[in-house]
Amino acid sequence: MDTVKAMEIVTQASADAEVRICRRMEIGSVVQQGDVYAHRVSDDHPRGVPLGTRQVAVGANVGARHVAEGDDVELFAGVELPPGVAVPEWATMEDMLGPVVVARGNWRFAHPEHAHHVLPSGTYQITNQLDFRTRRRVAD
């Protein structure tokens, strides 16, 4: 399949995606999008350096295209898991830990193959799903 055809398929899938709107999200709440989770955390949740990207999942394939969209959204390196989330003894924190999303207004958690989520302003720690069989981060 050529690149133009692949982009048409992704664009069409994104245009047809279901949109789930969440008007309130309390600290401690979680939204799942495929193999990625957005945890609402306190605004003083630890974070690292600004990332300069909007992609919240690792990878370059279509399955990794989980993106934080919005006019006032910044992503920072994750440094700490959300409260109450523990790393299994067979995994590392790096397997689970994604970036921190800081949104000063409503933002869209978008993906070309999953439902989009419109979430309220706040701070969100992204985590990755783990596969108990392979003992690694799940990758779409």
Image (cartoon, rainbow, N blue to C red):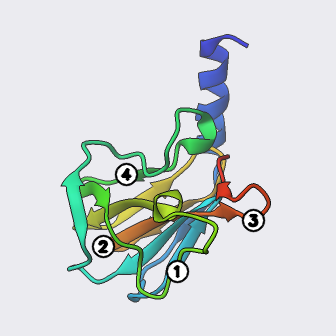
How far apart marks 2 and 3 lie (CA) works out to 28 Å
Residue at the spot of label 1: 86
Q: With respect to residue 26, does 72 lie above or below?
A: above
Mark 1 or mark 3: name the one nearer the start of the chain.
Answer: 1
Name, please, the residue furthest toward the top: 2
The three-letter amino acid code for the residue at tag 4 is: Glu
> Which numbered dot is residue 123?
2
Between 116 and 99, which is closer to the camera in this rendering? 99
Residue, x 59% and y 33% (percent of image)? 61
Q: Residue at x 30, y 73 (%)?
A: 123
Q: State the CA–CA distance, disc 4 to disc 1.
A: 28 Å
For disc 1, the neighbor class at 10 Å (few under 14, some 14 to 19, many from 20) is few
Q: Residues within 10 Å of mark 3 (few under 14, many from 20)?
A: few
**Amino acid type indicated by mark 3:** Phe
Of the residues under marks 2 and 1, which one precedes in the sequence?
A: 1
- Residue that mark 3 sits on: 132
Kindly check if marks 2 and 1 are in contact, taking CB atoms under 8 A apart as contact: no
Q: Could you tell which of marks 4 and 1 lies nearer the N-terminus?
A: 4
Q: Which residue is mark 4?
A: 69
Which corner quadrant holds the N terminus? top right
* Residue located 25% across and 55% down the image: 74
Task: Say whether disc 2 or disc 3 marks the residue closer to the N-terminus.
Answer: 2
**How far is disc 2 from disc 1 in space, using C-alphas?**
19 Å
Answer yes or no: do the residues labelled 1 and 3 have beta carbons within 8 Å? Answer: no
Foreground mark, 4 or 1, reads 1
Q: At numbered mark 2, what does the secondary structure look like: helix, strand or loop?
A: strand
